[in-house]
Image: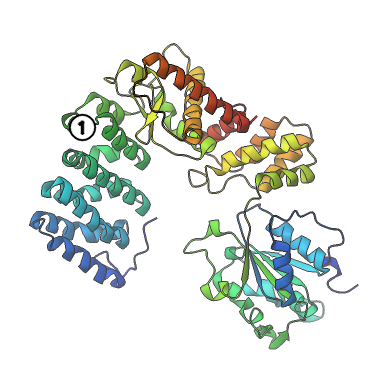
Amino acid sequence: MPEAVPMNAPDGFPSEWQDRWHVAHSRIDQAGYGDLVANAYRRAGPELAARIGPAFAVRFASSISQVAIRSGRLAASLMPQAALLASQRFEEPVAMNSWAAAIEDVARRSPDAVLPLLENTGRLVDAFDVPDFIAFVRMGLHLADGSPERRRAYFALESAEAIRLIEGPGAGGGLADLRHGLGLFLGALWGIAPPIAEAPPDAPEQMRRRPGFGGGGVRLPGAFAGFGSAEAKLLYRAAVAHVGAHHRFTRTRFPVAGLKPMQIALVSLIEDARVERLASRRMPGAV
Amino acid sequence: MTNLDAYRISSEPFYRAVDSEIELFEAAHKSRMPVMLKGPTGCGKTRFVEHMAWRLGKPLITVSCHEDMTASDLVGRYLLDAHGTVWHDGPLTLAVREGAICYLDEIVEARQDTTVVIHSLTDDRRILTLEKKNEVVRAHPDFHVVISYNPGYQSVLKDLKESTKQRFGAIAFGYPASEIEAEIITREAGIDRRTADALVRIAERSRNLKGHGLEEGASTRMLINAGLLVAAGIPIERACQVAMVVPISDDPDLRDALTGAIAACL
């Protein structure tokens, strides 16, 4: 629900917010980001205030600053219009705050990716709800780690993995159909809600076939070949239950440097057995 | 028989204390400090106030508040009968005159302009003004007002006025720790401890989804209901569906996830 705005606020800002709005846009005006950024924020601010609430519209100045500093003026100038587009789909202040935080995260970790990401706001918000948008962003940052060009292609929706994610249900079935329910199941079992996404088709074979976690998300195969839908669902559930057990019980990362592949496999096996044994004490039917 | 005999609780309502709530309530009752019981639905607030009324030997008048409730529903109104127009005390006035604990359950459900009638009873005046009757009723020494309040239901439209909140001492309730909750279910539903433990584990899974599709997780009351079904011979998976899954969500994905979580706990 949008924050309450009195009816006597034709420009979207109630009187008690006028001073804060003035401070916010003055900050952008005087920051040296240029007229393009300042004018875009001045134009969009009142509409954002009316749609999402004055608090978001004022706070949004900080997000624009972050993007301007890290990704440049052009990217920052797209932020207000992108926010208006996003607000057509994400109507709650909390959802828009999450959206803005995700953009800031990309600006921090992959500055060049912000521009193509903002340029594709319309397609992305049409395709994703907020949790899926965040999952999309995190997967892009994680999977294309260390390769600016691959990241740019991902956020420009030019890479196969990005296209596969944005096409969503119907593109491949399997995980796409079950992802929402698996997120709820994982949340119920372990009280966590990490994004769940499919490993990209050009990822290494081992990554595509095996469930995994890292970068704040859970990575699952797009489908379990040779299994019917009911069996596949059980496999997916077992996988996320197992990932949750690691999240709960694997407290320290085992140093694998210097170990041979067989030794790493053995250590992993023992750790898998340990966390499953601990999990089964609370949930005997989970693993 | 006095006006309040019907409101006396003759046998002890079971209540398992989880903290110092009994001592706190007794201390507040000594000075008739208005008490607010805050906590999620089904965590034992109403049972607690019943237990305290029995423990203190005081009659208990309970009013379940709702959004159509008016001040007249609380204080009383003139009604026509064979003898003409006669004043009938409402439940609040009865408690004030005769000296009872008046429990206003889920008070945020009532409109704010209704709840202000208790203001003059919850400060040192302890009076109730019956405007239509042109009468000021001084509270009986035993009159004590208790309200319940679920913070989870707060919203701009449904919240207590600040001037109402600040008249009360508040005791916070939550779902009991798992050991205590299992003990309560065992006692209330008449099932074995092992089954009660499983129900509590299932409830914890449900409570993990609060804010992620569920307004509230499964309450202690729901667990007792599931336990009662088990005691009546219903298999535990089916009992959980009936008592803990179907009532709290219509979302097929949520129901399916909860069903999976139940299987994981058994």
The color scheme shown is rainbow
Callout 1: few (<14), some (14-19), or many (20+) C-alpha neighbours within 10 Å? many
Chain identity of mark 1: A
Q: Is mark 1 on a helix, strand or loop?
A: helix
Specify the quadrant that holds the C terminus of chain B: top right
Give above or below for A243 relative to B162: above
Give whichever of B96, B220 is nearer the camera.
Answer: B220
Residue at left 52%, top 60%? B154
Specify the quadrant that holds the N terminus of chain B: bottom right
Give above or below for B220 relative to B134: above
Relative image position of residue A87 (x, y in whole percent): 29, 50
Residue at left 60%, top 72%? B115
Left or right of A281? Residue B225 is right
How many callouts does the rendering have?
A: 1
Give whichever of B207, B147 is nearer the camera.
Answer: B207
Left or right of A242? Residue B115 is right
> In the displayed image of the protein, which residue is found farthest to the top?
A226
> In the displayed image of the protein, which residue is found farthest to the front?
A258
Relative image position of residue A130 (x, y in whole percent): 35, 42
Q: What residue type is labelled 1?
A: Arg
Left or right of B185? Residue A48 is left
On the image, which quarter does residue B256 sit in? top right
Relative image position of residue B156 (x, y in whole percent): 46, 64
Residue at left 67%, top 30%? B237
Relative image position of residue B262 (x, y in whole percent): 61, 32
Whether residue A76 is visible: yes
Residue at left 51%, top 29%? A241
Whether residue B90 is visible: no
> In the displayed image of the protein, which residue is found farthest to the right?
B1
Residue for badge 1: A151
